[in-house]
Image (cartoon, rainbow, N blue to C red):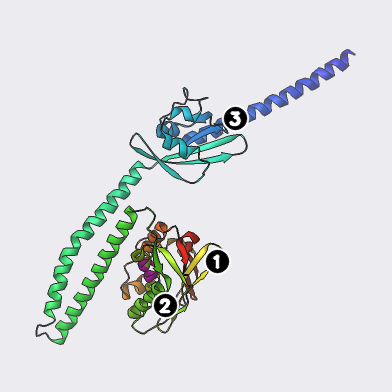
Amino acid sequence: MKASKESRDGKEGKEEKKILKKFEKAEEKEVRFKQTLRALPDGVVLMSQDWEIQWLNPMAERDLQLDAVADIGKKIHTCYPDGDFLNKVTSGDDTLQTITLEGRIIEIRVISAGSKYRILVTRDVTEQKRSEDFRRDFVANVSHELRTPLTVIKGFLELAEDWPLNSQQLKHLELMYEQVERMGALVNDLLTLSRLERDSAPAAKEPIDLTALLTDAAVDGRFISQGHHSIVVDHIEKVNILGDIIEMKSAVTNLVSNAVRYTPQEGSIVVSSFFNDEGLVISVKDNGIGIAADAIPRVTERFYRVDKSRSRETGGTGLGLAIVKHVLFRHQARLKILSELGKGSDFQIILPKDRVEKIV
C-alpha cells in the first residue's frame, strides 16, 4: 500500500510539474508578445467586447492620452467625453477613421479579436498631414505664380509670329511656343489636382448627359490624335450621371487622351458604357502598349509614367490619372484597370447606382 501511495504521489508530482511548465511557457509567450506590442510604432489597446480596457502599449498612451495603470479596467467610454470619438470607436465599422485629440491628428481602427476581445489600433499622423498640407500649399502657390509669367511669354511669342523671321528662327519660335503650352498645361493640371485634394467632400449631383459626355471626350481625343488613331463610341446607355460636369468631363477626357498617348499610330480606341452589378461602367479601351502587372497599382500616382519617352513626346503632364482618381473619389466611384503588356488596356470608371438616373 505504501509503495502504491508513493507511486501515485510521484505521478501527481510529475503532472503538477508538466502543468507548471505549461503555465511558465504561456507566461513567457505573453511577455514576449507584450514586449513586441510595446515596440510597435502604432498604439495598441486591448479591450473586452464590452469596451473595458485590458491592456495598452506606450504608443497608445501617448496617442490617446491614457494611463497604463489608472485606466486599466475602465470602459473606454468613461475616458473620453468627446461624442465624436466615441461614435467612431464604437460604430462597429473596422475601416480607418481620423480623430483629433488636443490638436493631434490620430488615425484609428477597431478590429475584432475573436468573441472576447477588441483591439483599437492608433497612429499619430499629425506631422504627415502637416507635411502633405505644406506640399499642397507650396505646389498651389508656385503654380499660381507661374501662370502670370507664362501668359506674358506666350503673348510675346504670339506677337513674334508677325515679325520677319527666317525659317530657322521660325522653328525656334515654334519650339518655344510648344514648351510654353506644355508648361501651361502642367500648371493647370497642378492647380486642378490641388483643388481636388483640398476638397474631398462628395461632388454635387447635377444631371450630366452621358451621350454628350462620351461623344465630347471622343471628339477631344480625335483632336489630340490628329487623325492617327481610330476613336469610336461603341455603346452609350440612355442615362444621366449625377455629378459635377466639369470634373466628370475632365476624368473621361483624361482617360481618352491617355489612351491616345499610349497607343501607336493606326491603333484603335473604343469608348463605351454598360451596367454591371456595381453600377454604371464607362470604358475606354485601346490596343496600345499595355501596362505591366506590377505597374498598374502605381499609374494613378502623380508624375508616374509607364513609358516616359512616349508621354513626353505627346505632351503628357503625368498628372491625368491622378486627377481621375481624385474626381472619382468625390463621386464615390472607382477606377478599374485591366491591361496586358503589349496588348492594350481597358480603363473603367465604375459609378455607383445612386450616381445614375435613367432618362424618362
**Which quarter of the picture shows residue 98?**
top left
**Taking the image as drawn, is residue 40 in sight?**
no
Mark 3 residue element: helix
Res 260 quadrant in image: bottom left
- Which amino acid, by three-letter code, is at mark 1? Asn
Question: Which x, y percent locates residue 107?
Answer: 42, 42
Which residue occupies 53% across, 37% down? 119
Q: Which labelled disc corresponds to residue 276?
A: 1
Q: Is residue 22 left or right of residue 75?
A: right
Name the residue type under label 2: Thr
Disc ID at residue 28? 3
Give the SS element for disc 1.
loop
In the picture as drawn, the residue positioned furthest to the left comes out as 164
Q: Earlier in the sequence, mark 2 or mark 1?
A: 2
Q: Would residue 250 be counted in the magenta stretch?
A: yes
Given residues 180 and 310, the one toward you in this image is: 180
Asked whether 322 or 253 is in front, the reply is 253
Query: Which of the two marks, 2 or 1, is nearer to us in this view?
Result: 1
